Image (cartoon, rainbow, N blue to C red):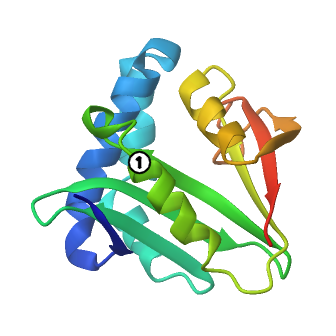
Amino acid sequence: MFFVRTAMKADLPAVQTLLTETWHATYDTLYGVEKVAEITRSWHSVEALQTRLSRPQSEFLVADDGKRIGGMAYAARSDKDVVLLHQIYVHPSLQRQGIGRDLFAEIETCFDGAKRIRLEVEPENEAACAFYRAHGFVEVGRTENCGADGSGIPALVMEKPLT
């Protein structure tokens, strides 16, 4: 059984491995192995993750069963009313077991006073789009630069009200 908890610095190498494996399993067919490797080296390096770990007004969570990190989520307040869900990933071998649901449920409770949670998701990642819709998100826009200016990665922008 996996338990959701706040990430620690010691978790970051395992989180990096989780993200690398999950990104390759999800996006190699869309972007190619080299592009995914380039993205994971940049976005999912231990250094990039450590910056997120110490960012004010953010929450970095892991799903841990005592032996391994099976999932992670990271969100940060963008302003008084809006939280950006930057990442929520579950290892491919552990998907559809409630880990993503549990991570998301915890993220929803972490930002007192926020009115909306927003995310960007690859439109061709049908499983992720279905997950977000099942959790109350609706499409509110699109971007051609998901994750970073000039990334060239298209994404749906989705939002959900927080109560």
Residue 125 shows in the view: no
Q: Residue visible at 41% across and 19% down?
A: 28
Q: Residue visible at 79% across and 68% down?
A: 162
Q: Is residue 70 left or right of residue 24?
A: left
Residue furthest toward the top? 29
Work out whether residue 94 or residue 24 is closer to the camera in this orientation and state it: 94
Instruction: Classify mark 1: helix, strand or loop.
Output: loop
Count of numbered labels shown in the rendering: 1
Q: Is residue 141 left or right of residue 157?
A: right
Residue furthest toward the right? 140
Q: Residue visible at 70% across and 50% down?
A: 119
Q: In terms of image quadrants, where is residue 121?
A: top right
Q: Position of residue 141 (x, y in %)?
A: 89, 39
Q: Position of residue 148 (x, y in %)?
A: 65, 48
Q: Position of residue 63 (x, y in %)?
A: 32, 61
Q: Quadrant of the N terminus?
A: bottom left
Residue 151 shows in the view: yes
Q: Residue visible at 46% across and 24% down?
A: 27
Q: Residues within 10 Å of mark 1 (few under 14, many from 20)?
A: few
- Above or below, 30 against 44 in this view is above
Q: Position of residue 30 (x, y in %)?
A: 52, 15
- Above or below, 90 against 56 in this view is above
Residue type at mark 1 is: Gly
Q: In terms of image quadrants, where is residue 32?
A: top left
Q: Which residue is mark 1?
A: 98
Q: Quadrant of the C terminus?
A: bottom right
